[in-house]
Image (cartoon, grey):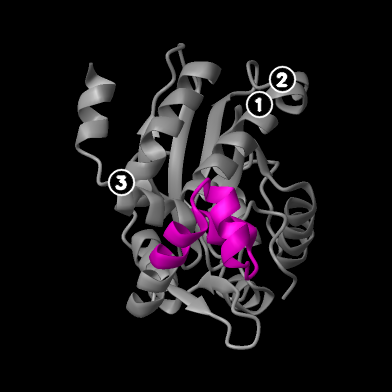
Amino acid sequence: MADVVERRNIVQAVERALDLLVILAQQGKPISVTEAATLAGLKLSTAHRLLNTMVLKGFVEQEPDTSRYRLGVAAIRLGGAAVEHMDIHTISRPYLEQLASTTEETVNLALLDGSEVVYIDQIESSQMVVVNMFARVGNRGPAYCTGSGKALLAALPDEELEDIIQTIEFVKFTSETIDTPEMLRKEIDKIRKDGYSLDLGERDEGVRCVAVPIMNQHGLAEAAVSVAGPSHRLTNFYLNHELIRLVQDTAHTITGRIGGSAFGSRPSE
């Protein structure tokens, strides 16, 4: 019954017009009215009227030489506005909860602020954590020695990354901490190649972390998602055979939700 009520509230012409917009977006190239009608399952005359109406409003453009249709400026602006108004915290939350449920470890969402990483959301582990973890909502710390921080640094354009590196005062928190610009540059190269960042006890002794940046439609990092836990649970085997993939899948899913492309496939600077 619910489905019937919902269908009764739908304006068929609007639904068909939106279907045509989706088809134009999916094709990624101008198509003829015949192709559009076939793909949408519409009569040729219906598709023609709908497309011409959207041309009038700027949501569709028609090429003068071929008469083929493509998305118009109004549609592109509308899509861009929708993405710009997305709240990364709200969008990410259900995926972070799912990741926390699957891993039973602490999941974080973090932003980059200059040379520091800032934690804006966290779902704590359902298991006992006997080690001290620096990451807490509202906390900020050096990006060069945290999983999320390094992931966000790796997503920066080279020039911006280099400017930040020049401002860092390297402090060695543990025996594993990166403490020179050369070591950090080498680590960034590895992260860009691998598509993820690891913190194997660099900021907190006995704490490990996997992090992946969430990329927006401009090819820039919006935030980073990470999973952290004690090293006796985040073993090399678990990292390599399961956890890295889970964090990557989550980050890539959120990236897709905000219209971005997965980290590692961004164009070279």
Graded by Cα atoms within 10 Å as few (under 14), some (14 to 19) or many (20 or more), the crowding at tag 2 reads: few
**49 left or right of 232?**
left
**Distance in Å between CA atoms under marks 1 and 2:** 6 Å
Residue 259 circle label: none
Q: Which residues are magenta?
A: 22-50
Mark sitting earlier along the chain (1/2): 2
Quarter of the picture containing the N terminus is: top left
The amino acid at mark 3 is: Gln
Graded by Cα atoms within 10 Å as few (under 14), some (14 to 19) or many (20 or more), the crowding at tag 3 reads: few
The amino acid at mark 2 is: Tyr
> Which element is circle 1 on?
helix
Q: Residue at x 33, y 76 (%)?
A: 57
Disc number lying in front (1 or 3)? 3
**218 left or right of 95?**
right
**85 left or right of 185?**
left
Q: Which residue is mark 2?
A: 238
Q: Which residue is mark 1?
A: 243
Quadrant in which residue 51 is drawn: bottom left
Kindly indicate whether the residue at mark 2 contacts the one at mark 1 (C-beta within 8 angstroms): yes
Q: Which residue is mark 3?
A: 12
Up-down relation of residue 224 to residue 75 (above or below): above
Report whether residue 112 is seen.
no
Up-down relation of residue 191 to residue 45 (above or below): above
Report whether residue 32 is seen.
yes
Q: Position of residue 65 (x, y in %)?
A: 64, 88
